Image (cartoon, rainbow, N blue to C red):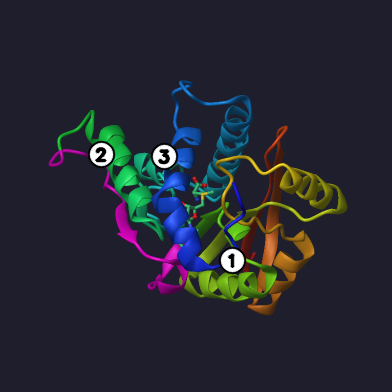
Amino acid sequence: AAEVGGGDKEVVRDYFNTTGFERWRKIYGSSTEGVNRVQLDIRLGHSQTVAAALRMLRDAGPLAGSTVCDAGCGVGSLSIPLACEGALVSASDISAAMVAEAQRQAEEALLAQHSPDDSPFRMPDFHVKDLESIGGRYDTVVCLDVLIHYPQDKAEAMIGHLASLAEKRLLLSFAPKTLYYDLLKRIGELFPGPSKATRAYLHAERDVERALNKFGWRVRNRGFVSTQFYFAKLVEAVPAGSA
Ligand code: SAM
């Protein structure tokens, strides 16, 4: 039950390949078997973040043919609907278990109606990779609910790296640091549950925005999702000089 985090990447990787994989696959799935009330609430909140991100992404026009990097893709909750809309998705995650599950779910979703040869959609390109090792350039880079594993001093460099991969826009979601949520988190930490195993870092919106500005980006759009146990800020950033 103890907290085993500390922002250590190895710990996060191990967690998301073992107990964390089982926990989050359940939360991000659709079955209700063995899913408790808190997990169902987190599922609801997370699905709203994915829906809000998809809305923001569609705002600039159809996604077909645009290149998207989904950094820390989990089980593919965003990559799969993006690929279904014709986006060319490159998805990666530090956890091999997550990537294998994302690949399986994508095959099920995308190839169910089409044989690989006549599918109008391209399967996302899945890779096991930590964020810092992602290379290339993409129209859009998205990173949902991953910053929670980064303390603020590492978060800034991570935001800089993601921005360097993006041509047109960058979407980030994170658990907001406010007095209220900080307090809730502290109360939560007094009662560690058996399956909450990594340290969680909240981020002040102004710190995230300051980091984006430092790397030449500005926030164009914002969203906020909150359910009982899930809170996320979503920001869409564009290069500072663009409309
Ligand atoms: N973005 C996905 C979504 O919203 O459905 C998954 C969110 S889940 C809470 C966090 C994910 O980040 C996990 O799949 C974990 O393995 C991944 N992750 C954590 N640290 C990472 C890192 N340094 N590089 C790449 N992925 C990482």
Mark identifier at residue 7: 1
User: Which of marks 2 and 3 precedes in the sequence?
Assistant: 3
In the image, what residue occupies the spot 76% across and 46% down? 190
Which amino acid, by three-letter code, is at mark 1? Answer: Gly
Image quadrant holding the C terminus, namely bottom right
- Gap between marks 3 and 2 measured at Cα: 12 Å
Q: Nearer the viewer, mark 3 or mark 2?
A: 2
In the structure shown, which secondary structural element does the residue marked by tag 1 occupy? loop
In the image, what residue occupies the spot 52% across and 65% down? 168
Q: Nearer the viewer, mark 1 or mark 3?
A: 1
In the structure shown, which secondary structural element does the residue marked by tag 2 occupy? helix
Q: Answer yes or no: do the residues labelled 1 and 2 have beta carbons within 8 Å?
A: no
- Gap between marks 1 and 3 measured at Cα: 30 Å
In the structure shown, which secondary structural element does the residue marked by tag 3 occupy? helix
User: Which residue is most to the left?
Assistant: 117
Residue 236 coordinates in the image, percent (x, y): 63, 57
Q: Which residue is mark 3?
A: 81
